């Protein structure tokens, strides 16, 4: 894992788990918005690689908090089942990598952006 200073230099959000620094929601939203913008563009592979790493970092810090929220649910409920399935899918997607070529990288970045948005939405819904 990158140190906090490496995260700042690389443009990653500096975030933490509960009890540490707050999650930088604005940076996460900006990364998601950038990924959505790329759908209408023909980005270079380097840009997709950078954005993929950034989104994976955001997912890495959002995932434990959302996972903890679902872990508190009854493990037989429909809500727990849906959440557990989605969280499993997010973890699987993060491990996939960019694949071969720009099209594969583009698809992966779009999926990571959707997963990141879902995690952010889940986190915010649980805070209300």
Image (cartoon, helix red, strand yellow):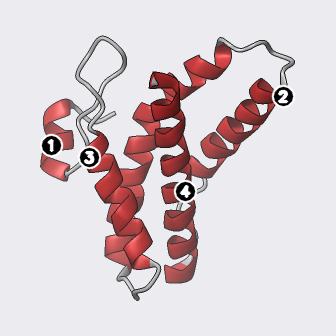
Question: Regarding mark 3 in the picture, which secondary structure is present there?
Answer: helix
Asked if the residues shown at circle 4 and circle 3 are in contact, with their CB atoms under 8 angstroms apart, the answer is: no
Q: Nearer the viewer, mark 2 or mark 4?
A: 2
The residues tagged by marks 2 and 3 sit, at their Cα atoms, a distance apart of 31 Å
Residue 118 location, x and y as percent?
Answer: 55, 46
Residue under label 3: 26
The residues tagged by marks 2 and 4 sit, at their Cα atoms, a distance apart of 22 Å
- Mark 3 or mark 1: which comes first in sequence? 1
Residue located 38% across and 75% down the image: 37
Question: Regarding mark 1 in the picture, which secondary structure is present there?
Answer: helix
The residues tagged by marks 1 and 4 sit, at their Cα atoms, a distance apart of 23 Å
Residue under label 2: 78
Residue furthest bottom in the image: 42
Q: Nearer the viewer, mark 1 or mark 4?
A: 4
The residues tagged by marks 3 and 1 sit, at their Cα atoms, a distance apart of 14 Å
Q: For the N terminus, which image quadrant?
A: top left
Q: Residues within 10 Å of mark 4 (few under 14, many from 20)?
A: some
Residue under label 4: 114
- Mark 1 or mark 4: which comes first in sequence? 1
Residue furthest front in the image: 128
The residues tagged by marks 1 and 2 sit, at their Cα atoms, a distance apart of 39 Å
Q: Nearer the viewer, mark 1 or mark 2?
A: 2
Q: Residues within 10 Å of mark 3 (few under 14, many from 20)?
A: few
Q: Residues within 10 Å of mark 2 (few under 14, many from 20)?
A: few
Asked if the residues shown at circle 1 and circle 4 are in contact, with their CB atoms under 8 angstroms apart, the answer is: no
Asked if the residues shown at circle 1 and circle 2 are in contact, with their CB atoms under 8 angstroms apart, the answer is: no
Say which mark, if any, is on residue 8: 1
Q: Residues within 10 Å of mark 1 (few under 14, many from 20)?
A: few
Left or right: 1 as drawn, with respect to 126 = left
Residue 72 location, x and y as percent?
Answer: 65, 11
- Mark 1 or mark 2: which comes first in sequence? 1
Nearer-the-camera pick, 8 or 125: 125
């Amino acid at each position: 894992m990158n140190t906090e200073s490496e995260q700042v230099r690389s443009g990653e959000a500096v975030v933490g788990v509960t009890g540490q620094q707050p999650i930088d929601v604005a940076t996460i939203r900006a990364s998601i918005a950038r990924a959505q913008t790329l759908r209408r563009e023909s980005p270079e592979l380097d840009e997709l690689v950078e954005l993929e790493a950034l989104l994976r970092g955001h997912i890495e810090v959002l995932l434990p908090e959302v996972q903890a929220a679902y872990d508190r649910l009854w493990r037989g409920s429909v809500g727990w089942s849906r959440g557990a399935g989605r969280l499993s899918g997010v973890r699987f997607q993060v491990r996939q990598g960019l694949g071969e070529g720009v099209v594969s990288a583009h698809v992966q970045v779009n999926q990571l952006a959707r997963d990141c948005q879902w995690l952010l939405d889940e986190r915010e819904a649980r805070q209300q």
